[in-house]
Image (cartoon, coloured by chain):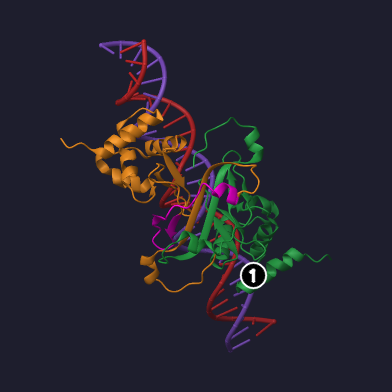
Chain colours: A green, B orange, C red, D purple
DNA sequence: ATAATTGTTGCAACTCGGTTGCATTTTTGA
DNA sequence: TCAAAAATGCAACCGAGTTGCAACAATTAT
């Protein structure tokens, strides 16, 4: 029997967060651990496949719980659907790029976010939960297969 | 008859963008011109009131057109609804803060966004349409009326 | 081990933001 | 002023996400 390291990670994560380890939570967490880009709920459902067959409500509840416990980060998009990624030390807060054409989300190199609060907020009237930098445009792939268009920032 | 300066602004904006000036477009544009924070479609509808009585589909189409022409910016939020603000020279690109408690969006001081592309994107494989920095947490108002909670970034 | 309690999941139905198709009305340009 | 083109309104729809509740699984106490 081959030991699954990822599975161990998932188990440990739930344990550290102090939430009970169910098969559904482990399945969702394993998908997020394997991911190299933020995932939408639809993508997670597809990755789970028909074998797991977890209800979408359950997925939303699991993701909501994970976010509350700081296990994952939630990223907004103008498309309507939100995206999720691990919030581990190995995956520190970083900007994202979403392509206007193909809709794909990619991760960009981390910035010194520790300075960001002082940089962005002059007065400390706010308490910060989350900083989100999203850049949208065309990815290299879609750029070549599209007409030129004016840049609008 | 008192001359409405804002109305002149709206007319000029549509003219410059080369799109026909209808009463609905002028009404929506005037609301956006007056706004001091990004507005949701619902807020715009409420501001229009029953007197104007513009269909929601029309508002969505107007906002979509304005965004395409670079008249306004669209801001994503995890709540599902998108927010809109003027994209004029007097209102340059800037970060936003949204309160987890009351949901209100506020505008923060502009950053040197001209440097942002080089800062954020190491390789120039991407063409950038829009940069979005959203900070969420608790505003000063809600901060005082809520229990302490762990910061999660 | 077993019963009682608590927490989790699945299902159905629903809300809300946003879109599409099409008929009707308004704007534009000759 | 009148025809062509564009914009609006209406109804119906789609997708993301939520709520209530019953069924089920996992703990905890006995």
Q: Position of residue B147 (x, y in %)?
A: 42, 74
Q: Is residue C21 left or right of residue A109?
A: left
Q: Chain of mark 1?
A: A
> Quick one: which residue is furthest to the left in this view?
B1
Q: Quadrant of the N terminus of chain B?
A: top left
Q: Residue at x 73, y 64 (%)?
A: A6
> Residue B75 versus residue B125: which sits nearer the camera?
B125
Q: Residue at x 34, y 50 (%)?
A: B36
Magenta span contains residue B130: no
Q: Which residues are magenta?
A: B96-120
Magenta span contains residue B107: yes
Q: Give SS at disc 1.
A: helix
Q: Is residue D1 above or below residue C27?
A: above
Q: Is residue A22 left or right of residue B14?
A: right
Q: Is residue B16 above or below residue A34?
A: above
Q: Position of residue B52 (x, y in %)?
A: 27, 38
Count of residue discs:
1
Quarter holding residue C4: bottom right
Q: Is residue C12 left or right of residue A30?
A: left
Q: Position of residue B103 (x, y in %)?
A: 40, 58
> Quick one: which residue is furthest to the right in this view?
A1
Q: Position of residue A59 (x, y in %)?
A: 59, 58
> Residue D12 versus residue A65: which sits nearer the camera?
A65
Q: Quadrant of the C terminus of chain B?
A: bottom right
List the residue tagged with mark 1.
Answer: A14
Q: Is residue B78 above or below residue B53?
A: below
> Residue B9 versus residue D16: which sits nearer the camera?
B9
How many residues crowd around disc 1 within 10 Å: few (fewer than 14), some, or many (20 or more)? some
Q: Residue at x 25, y 38 (%)?
A: B5
């Amino acid at each position: 029997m081959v030991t699954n390291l990822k599975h161990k990670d998932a188990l440990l994560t739930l344990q550290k967060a102090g939430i009970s380890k169910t098969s559904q939570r482990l399945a969702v967490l394993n998908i997020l651990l394997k991911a190299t880009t933020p995932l939408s709920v639809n993508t997670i459902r597809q990755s789970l496949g028909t074998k797991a067959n977890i209800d979408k409500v359950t997925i939303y509840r699991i993701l909501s719980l994970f976010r509350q416990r700081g296990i994952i980060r939630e990223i907004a998009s103008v498309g309507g659907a939100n995206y999720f990624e691990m919030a581990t030390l190995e995956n520190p807060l970083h900007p994202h790029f979403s392509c206007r054409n193909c809709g794909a989300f990619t991760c960009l190199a981390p910035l010194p976010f520790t300075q960001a609060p002082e940089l962005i907020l002059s007065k400390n009237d706010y308490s910060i939960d989350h900083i989100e930098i999203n850049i949208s445009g065309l990815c290299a792939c879609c750029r070549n297969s599209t007409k030129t268009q004016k840049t609008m920032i």
